[in-house]
Amino acid sequence: MTRMTDEQLDQTITRHLTWRATQLQGIPDAQGMAWRIAGERLTRRPRWQHAVALLAVTALLAAVAVATLIVAGSRPPTGPLTNGPLVVANALGWNGIDPASGAAVQLEPCDGQCEEALDPRLSADGRTVFFVDPTPESGDLLSDQPGWAIWRWDRLEGSVRRVVGCDGLDCTLRRPIPSPDGRYLAYGQGDDAPNIPMPPLDELVIVDAETGREVRRFGDLIADGWWWEYPNFAWDADGQLLVTSLGPDGFRYRRIDVTTGAVVDVTLPRDGSLESSPDGATMLLFGAQLDRLSVWVLDDRLESTRLVWEGEGWRPGTWSPDGTRIAGQSMSVAPPPRNMAWTTHVLDVATGALTTQVDDEAVEGQLLWLPAD
Amino acid sequence: MVTDKPLEPELARPVPLAPAGADVGLESFVVEHYDRLVRLARLVCHDATDATDAVQAGLERAWRHRGSLRDAEHRSPWLDRIVVREAIRVSKRRRTWLERVLGIDHEADVVLTSADPTPDVALRVVLDGALDRLSPEQRAVVALHLYAGYTVQETADIVGAPLETVRSRLRLARERLRTVLGESQP
């Protein structure tokens, strides 16, 4: 049996796709589609009906919130965090295993109010998880709701609410990271659709974590094309935001004072992308070259580093709630019918010990390490 | 959908095909892009009903937000992005619903018969089955890169995924297809 080259394989697939794309039985023609869309638009519910419904729902939610606050007010404050289940967040919810009991953990933080809960980040006190819903429109395609949104899930109350969103199909939101004191939320905003196929230009936005009110917005701090691959901003223990950018002149680091808006250049002893523990106490630098990854711990004054691990590449995903470990995943080819295998890596930041686990049941998603209840 | 209300003026007026950037009527807007979009959606969804739903939802959203497109030259990739993402979402929702409620997997509408006029029906059956077993995200990157001709970077922009993720999906899809082709060719 002769192995096909990649080029031959691609040609075979392209020929098949070209033929397959012409098999349009059961699909209406363009005129029919135009009439379907026109019919949907004409039967859209008037805006005033949406407003009345919204008012009724808001009043109901307010009553429930007041009642919930009264009940929650008697609860003790959150104590030191211990590590609980490590879950994978994707369109099906948050699923994982509780290490203490071995029981399956299945969470659906949207609770019917949002569509998907992706890119989750835990607050330093372990009470709140911020996440991105990229599909708020899908429930009602004909309404004029805004685009992507960031939500917050209160673990104690089990409630979820929208914090901030952005309008239009062009907008995407990423990496909602709360500050160590919980006052602010930093996230990235992309506005790339009109510029396709040009690279996107991303903005860094800082808002009030409670109200969503915008505090700062920076459009020129983060370099294009690097956004998705590795973390590029992190809160330090003092509540200032450190930002990494990679431009034509190499790496550049800046520190933002959220209170004043002042931005100052910072020099780090090594090049890499920044990731801090939720309380900002531990700052890591990830240096990636092809498939190899190096992880350094930065000292308190950002003046020196300690190499804790070096090896084949994986992508950091979540910190442990107690701030001692960081977990990530890598993906590899697996025999059919699985096709893909995910390996979860957990790095002990103090010792550099790396443990790996291939989960036969794992699915594609983003990791979130929750505290033990 | 049947309605007894008069058409809105912008929907009813016949407008000839306009150059890129001009504000055209809904019908012309749909006609101008429909063939390309429905074929892309067909490749991602592997299901005629899902593809129809995805294109309808995508075009509806695009029409509503057409004012946000600042550069008319990018209208095609902009529409491709909207419809492909909608196709992924529709496919995932269908599969999720079937898996959760019925406990079975999505069944593709493979329409290959011995009456097919081309000689290599067996190869098409094999490829179709293999493509159907890919995830919607994998099929999307395969369709965008190997059918629509987008580069890997452009494909990443359209599906809204990291570049490395798109490369991985392409690699995994190729491995999958190579495996089934190898199995089918002694």
Image (cartoon, rainbow, N blue to C red):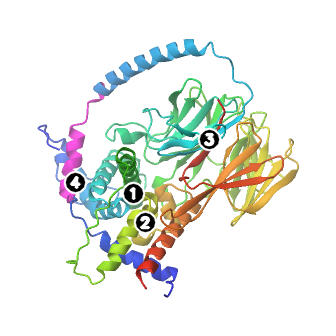
Q: Which residue is mark 3?
A: A102
Q: Which residue is mark 1?
A: B84
Rendered-image quadrant of the C terminus of chain A: top right
* Disc 1 + disc 2, Cβ < 8 Å: yes
- Identify the chain of the residue marked 3, using the numbered disc in the image: A
* Disc 1 from disc 3: Cα separation: 39 Å
Lower sequence index among marks 3 and 4: 4
Q: Is residue B24 above or below residue A14?
A: above
For mark 4, give the secondary structure: helix
* Disc 1 from disc 4: Cα separation: 17 Å
Same chain under badges 3 and 2? The reply is: no
A93 on left or right of B90: right
Query: Which residue in the rendered view is the most extreme toward the bottom?
Result: A2
**Amino acid, disc 4:** Met
Q: Which residue is mark 2?
A: B144
- Identify the chain of the residue marked 1, using the numbered disc in the image: B
